[in-house]
Image: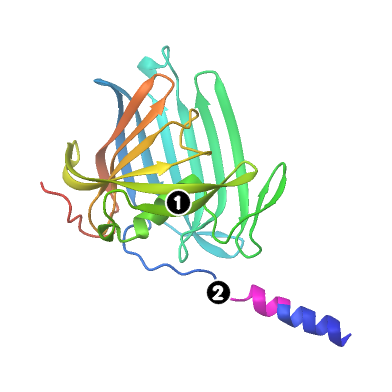
Amino acid sequence: MIKTLIIFCISTILHSQPLRVVEYNAFGLGEKLEYDIGYKFIKAGTGYFEIGKEPLIYNGNKCYDVNFVVKSLSSLEWIYKVRDSYRTYIDIAGIFPWRYEQKIREGNYKRDIYTEFDQVNNLAKTKKGEYKTPPFVHDIVSAFYFIRTLDLKKYKKGDIIELKNFYKDSTYKLDVKILGREVIDVKAGKFKTVIVEPLVKEGGLFKTEGRIIIWMSDDERKIPIKVGTEIVIGFVGAELRQYSGIRGKIDAKIN
């Protein structure tokens, strides 16, 4: 009886310890980033990142309800139809995921995935089973938002940021490489940017798992100004068209 009580007390103490807390000012509730997506000189579709305006309570945890959606223009769907959506519940305090959903519709290809993350016991739960994970493992969307919390000004060209990404039934190494800095001009304005490349082995933002390059505002917001990725039909670019709900001033904006 005493032994059981001791084990119970130790377990309670361990599981009542606070989870990770991250300090950041990069984003917040209600942020929406809208993009034009083009192939060469043709506008092929639209996309957006959006954080819900109110916190979502998931299993007692206060979360950002984050959606990333990409769709092709209806006028071009006879060539190649895209309807991709990703939804992640990201812990507001610690910037790690509690749930991840992925629905891919690209041409005739379909893929639906969901993962429940038990960040207390370091488990990922899918419809196929439970898998052990490292502490605060990410999905691909939560990893992107976590990168936005970092001080990228202290990194130089060639530096690597190391993360872990769970996908399907395994945890993969997810390195983010700093490629350099560049001033770019898009519909939303002209921005100083830091260029990063997520070296994704599995679970990327598109079916082909091709190379992804991201130009992020080189300031405290670290807004993705431009995203380039390889898909079946070639190299597709997404450029920021407009934004709303930004947490503060975008110092990297030149005009």
Q: Nearer the viewer, residue 17 or 255?
A: 17
- Write the start and end of the magenta stretch as one range: 11-18
Q: Going 86% across and 87% down the picture, which residue do you hit?
A: 2
Query: Looking at the image, can residue 73 be seen?
Result: no
Q: How many marks?
A: 2
Check disc 2: other Cα within 10 Å, few if <14, some if 14-19, many if 20+: few
Seen in the picture, residue 108 relative to 25 is either above or below; the reply is above
Q: Where is mark 1, residue-wise?
A: 143
Q: Secondary structure at mark 2?
A: loop
Mark on residue 18?
A: 2
Spatial CA span between label 2 and label 1: 21 Å
Most common SS among magenta residues: helix
Residue furthest top as drawn: 78
Q: Position of residue 160 (x, y in %)?
A: 38, 52
Residue furthest bottom as drawn: 2
Seen in the picture, residue 63 relative to 210 is either above or below; the reply is below
Residue 227 magenta: no
Q: Position of residue 37 (x, y in %)?
A: 32, 29
Q: Position of residue 90 (x, y in %)?
A: 49, 56
